[in-house]
Image: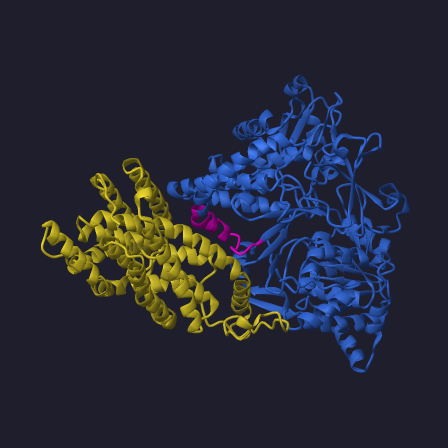
Chain colours: A blue, B yellow
């Protein structure tokens, strides 16, 4: 039973949700494993109105930018309610915001009022205060932290507002009525993978368009587990969507995820590829540790799941079609797949029940589907989850497109792609060098399907622009068309396939171009490799920086205390060299010039906030700078190396 | 309506294989049970009683009526009634799980019926098969192969007790190593399919046209007994006002009988001329029940989806927000059939 709310702006949505869902739980926060605190839609809205009245009272104007520096927590949502209901704009950023970013964002966005999460952030913002001339009010979210001088606790603002409303103040209602669809609801600063942060301006109508196109059915009985940073648009849209559907969001953390999956029994979960990778690893580790009979049963089950699902995909026309799939071939193979399906069904049925179900139990057992976004999901893992019966609806989008441009649905579930564009969204594939439109263009065979180029998008979700950056805005936004900077193609069953970032392309000195991401993804499949980055711009061959996985080497009896010990270990190098050889084969699609000739084991992992974005994407320029000497060493001529 | 066989239906090798399969399956069944499951029977007495009524009250009657209506020959008829009187098997637990029924109730019913069958089965069997045993006696006297045919009550009890030995062994394993027990459970299920398929395969090789020569009444009987069982189980529990979750469990438990037990009884207690016929009936039933219950399960799963989601949500809310938390769904969200059901959202869950 679907029950989406249709609203004209976020404030309106929050009001309608309270009217419709009243006492249903909207959010739940964990106290202990089996003790959670629910907050209902009505409570949240009432508290939000109080906070909004308080904000208005302390001088927040309509359409003013309000900072919100915090990770996922109930108070984040409360602050969001307060900001939206007072007609202001939410400028969010996570707990791990660096000094430079904090100063840049507050000054660039002209923030006068800012929420901070805890004592750490409170200290940070107070220390930087001399650099923040415009900042007037700091509001502390965490109740347990003692507010420093000049910092107000959240409770105080809420109390002021509650008092005002009690006296009959109607300013919140007035503000809500004044919101226009074209007004901003948020300004999100993306650190991206290059350059200084840019403020992406998203409007209420951007958000509302997303509410109507998300191809997932949720209702009052659904439970959504939330683990991604809320200030990231992917998670944020999702949480607003759960409000829209009356579902309850449960906040979890990487530390408690395993436990929470069991206790909350989520019916839905959205996460970044990294989580699926680790869940996949965990399942495989369990299988490896199980005794031979169970292992054999698992392999039989997986085998059956594989061929059963592949036949289903084929018969539904949901197999990856990078080239045109001729009609005669379909005619020829259809009976084959039908027959295979018929033979497999009883066996698959049994193993699905006896073996695969227990594996699905480790993910809570009630997952209807999962969404992956915020980065490319490795094909292997994508297929793994689909084969064992947890459909992965991979989506595609950017902060600038708030974010969903395309998503797989239950009907169109083509692994290896990010699904068809969502309704009302136009997609173009544009040649990078010539700037010519490749798709859709009737001049090209099949309207340009199967040709690779940069993805451009146009639709109701595309941002208004970058805040106070007209130059940069013009360079990516033209006549409503947004240049995503991603390489991709349209498959022959009209799905989008992502082929990498156009900007991270490595050009070797012989002129060969390669996309590092798919190759890195392949390498990360290894149980010995934690993370890696390919290098080789303007060099003769490809090199790699590799962060090894310490545990895996300990299992091989290589006594290493830290990554540092490992980085010079001859045996470790030998193992990695063999792994690279095994993973980067011609049969897995790696071309000759893409082969890694040299690599270095790093003595430190990549850290979130430094080398990685919050969604575990590599900040290539940071890594390149940090390991400048190591990279230079990789490409030194051999004889020089032996001498030194 | 006689099924003439050129040679014996099962060779000694098949019989041994079947024996081993029964051992393994019953061991696997034991491995899925704990002592707590027996204790739980008392807590779910109402559901178990209704299940008991439909398993030992309705099912044998259904089997008898089918045998009479279809005018089955005595060997087939006795076998069908035997199947009607069987206790529930562990496969019903698995199907119940996927049909979104109450697995706990299903396990309780399996446990209870297996124990009760010790004395219920012989009583029911001799009660309902009277007419047919007389027919066989007449035939035997006419052919001068014997004097009187009686249901071997004592042998049946012995076979039932024998079958319970591996169950007890499985439970012991479960007690000491849950991990191995789980493996034994899965392996048993897998083995059962393999053996059934192997038996069917060899039967086809030896008696290629057996499927053609089997009278149609027998097909109707072996398929019908399960299907009608599902039907009655479902409606009876509904009439008693049991909630949907239990309806599905009782329905499946009624229709799905413990096939391996019937093999054990037939092999150990009966002899030719009717043994081969009875075995064939048991094989047909075992093969068809997997198919029919698969379809029924899919249907129930689809039908019960909404109720189940509400139930699950209530359960999680009570688990995390406290026993007394009441989930307040918007007006009109819950359909009338579960709106006032105490377990479905308007008050704390009573079932664990």
Residue B53 left/right relative to A32: left
Residue at the far top: name it. Answer: A639
Q: Quadrant of the N terminus of chain A?
A: bottom right
Residue A35 left/right relative to B219: right
Comparing A361 with B293, the one in front is B293
Comparing B334 with A371, the one in front is B334
**Image quarter of residue A280:** top right
Q: Is residue B325 visible?
A: yes
Query: What is the magenta range?
Result: A350-368
The residue sitting at 21% across, 58% down in the picture is: B161
Where does the image place residue A381, in percent across and percent down from the top left?
57, 41
Please give the count of numbered marks on the rendered protein.
0
Where does the image place residue A421, in percent across and percent down from the top left?
73, 45
A424 versus A27 height, above or below: above
Is residue A219 part of the magenta span, yes or no? no
Residue B149 left/right relative to B220: left
Comparing A545 with B104, the one in front is B104
Q: Is residue B87 visible?
A: no
Characterize the magenta stretch by its predominant secondary structure: helix
Where does the image place residue A286, in percent across and percent down from the top left?
46, 45
């Amino acid at each position: 039973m679907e029950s989406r709310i249709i609203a004209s702006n976020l404030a309106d949505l929050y009001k309608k949700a309270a009217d419709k869902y009243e006492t249903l739980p909207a959010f739940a926060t964990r106290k202990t494993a089996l003790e959670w605190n629910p907050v209902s839609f009505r409570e949240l809205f009432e508290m939000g109105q109080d906070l909004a009245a308080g904000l208005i009272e302390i001088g927040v104007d309509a359409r003013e930018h309000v900072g919100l520096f915090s990770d996922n927590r109930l108070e984040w949502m409360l602050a969001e309610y307060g900001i939206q209901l007072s007609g202001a704009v939410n400028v969010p950023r996570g707990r791990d915001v660096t000094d430079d970013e904090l100063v840049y964002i507050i000054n660039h966005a002209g923030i006068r009022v800012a929420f901070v999460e805890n004592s750490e952030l409170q200290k940070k913002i107070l220390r930087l205060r001399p650099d923040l001339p415009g900042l007037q009010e700091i509001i502390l979210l965490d109740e347990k932290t003692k507010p420093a001088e000049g910092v107000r606790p959240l409770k105080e603002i809420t109390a002021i507002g509650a008092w005002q409303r009690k006296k009959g103040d109607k300013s919140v209602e007035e503000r809500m009525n004044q919101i226009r669809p074209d007004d901003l609801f948020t300004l999100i600063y993306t650190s991206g993978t290059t350059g200084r942060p840019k403020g992406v301006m998203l409007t209420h109508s951007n958000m509302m368009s997303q509410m109507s196109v998300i191809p997932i059915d949720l209702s009052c009985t659904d439970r959504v587990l939330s683990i991604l940073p809320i200030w990231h648009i992917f998670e944020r849209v999702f949480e607003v969507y759960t409000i829209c559907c009356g579902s309850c969001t449960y906040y979890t953390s990487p530390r408690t995820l395993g436990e929470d999956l069991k206790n909350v029994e989520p019916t839905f979960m959205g996460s970044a590829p990294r989580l699926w990778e680790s869940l996949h690893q965990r399942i495989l580790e369990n299988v490896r540790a199980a005794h031979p009979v169970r292992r054999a049963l698992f392999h039989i089950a997986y085998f059956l799941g594989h061929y059963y699902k592949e036949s289903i995909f084929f018969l539904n026309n949901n197999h990856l079609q990078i080239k045109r799939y001729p009609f005669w071939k379909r005619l020829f193979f259809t009976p084959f797949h039908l027959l295979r399906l018929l033979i497999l069904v009883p066996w698959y049925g049994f193993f699905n029940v006896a073996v695969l179900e227990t594996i699905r139990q480790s993910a809570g057992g009630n997952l209807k589907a999962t969404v992956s976004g915020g980065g490319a999901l490795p094909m292997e893992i994508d297929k793994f989850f689909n084969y064992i019966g947890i459909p992965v609806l991979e989506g595609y989008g950017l902060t600038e497109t708030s974010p969903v441009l395309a998503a797989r649905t239950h009907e169109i579930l083509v692994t290896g792609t990010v699904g068809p564009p969502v309704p009302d969204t136009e997609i173009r594939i544009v040649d990078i060098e010539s700037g010519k439109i490749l798709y859709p263009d009737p001049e090209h065979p099949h309207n340009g399907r199967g040709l690779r180029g940069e993805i451009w998008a146009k639709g109701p979700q595309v941002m208004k622009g970058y805040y106070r950056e007209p130059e940069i805005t013009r360079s990516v936004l033209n006549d409503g068309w947004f240049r995503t900077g991603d390489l991709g193609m349209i498959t022959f069953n009209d799905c989008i396939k992502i082929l990498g970032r156009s900007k991270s392309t490595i050009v070797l000195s012989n002129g060969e171009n390669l996309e590092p991401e798919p190759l890195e993804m392949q390498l990360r499949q290894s149980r010995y490799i934690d993370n890696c980055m390919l290098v080789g711009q303007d060099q003769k061959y490809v090199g790699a920086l590799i962060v090894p996985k310490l545990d895996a080497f300990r299992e091989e009896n290589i006594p290493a205390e830290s990554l540092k010990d490992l980085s010079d270990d001859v045996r470790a190098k030998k193992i990695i060299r063999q792994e690279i050889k095994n993973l980067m084969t011609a049969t897995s699609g790696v071309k000759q010039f893409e082969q890694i000739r040299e690599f270095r084991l790093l003595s430190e992992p990549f850290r979130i906030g430094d080398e990685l974005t919050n969604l575990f994407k590599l900040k290539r320029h940071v890594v390149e700078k940090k390991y400048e000497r190591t990279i230079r060493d990789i490409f030194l001529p051999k004889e020089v190396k032996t001498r030194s | 309506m006689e099924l003439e066989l050129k040679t014996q239906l099962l060779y000694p090798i098949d019989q041994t294989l079947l024996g081993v399969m029964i051992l393994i399956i019953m061991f696997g069944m034991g491995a899925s049970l704990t002592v707590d499951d027996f204790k739980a029977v008392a807590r779910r007495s109402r559901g178990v009683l209704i299940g008991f009524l439909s398993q030992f009250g309705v099912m044998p009657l259904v089997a008898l009526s089918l045998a009479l209506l279809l005018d089955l020959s005595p060997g087939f008829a006795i076998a069908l009634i035997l199947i009607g009187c069987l206790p529930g098997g562990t496969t019903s637990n698995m199907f119940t799980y996927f049909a979104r029924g109450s697995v706990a109730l299903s396990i309780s019913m399996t446990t209870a019926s297996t124990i009760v069958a010790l004395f219920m089965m012989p009583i029911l069997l001799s009660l309902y098969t009277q007419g047919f045993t007389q027919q066989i006696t007449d035939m035997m006297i006419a052919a001068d192969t014997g004097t009187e045919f009686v249901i071997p009550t004592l042998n049946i009890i012995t076979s039932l007790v024998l079958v319970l030995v591996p169950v007890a062994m499985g439970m012991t394993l479960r007690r000491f190593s849950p991990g191995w027990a789980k493996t034994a459970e899965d392996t048993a299920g897998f083995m059962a399919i393999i053996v059934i398929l192997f038996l069917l395969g060899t039967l086809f090789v030896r008696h290629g046209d057996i499927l053609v020569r089997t009278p149609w009444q027998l097909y109707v009987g072996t398929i019908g007994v399960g299907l009608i069982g599902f039907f009655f189980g479902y409606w009876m529990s509904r009439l008693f006002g049991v909630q949907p979750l239990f309806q599905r469990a009782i329905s499946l438990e009624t229709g799905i009988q413990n096939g391996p037990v019937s093999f054990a009884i037939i092999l150990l207690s009966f002899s030719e001329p009717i043994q081969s016929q009875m075995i064939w009936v048991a094989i047909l039933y075992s093969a068809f029940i997997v198919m029919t219950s698969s379809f029924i399960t899919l249907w129930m799963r689809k039908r019960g989806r909404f109720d189940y989601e509400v139930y699950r949500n209530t359960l999680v809310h009570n688990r995390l927000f406290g026993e007394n938390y009441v989930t307040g769904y918007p007006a009109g969200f819950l359909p009338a059939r579960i709106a006032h059901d105490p377990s479905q959202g308007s008050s704390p869950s009573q079932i664990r």
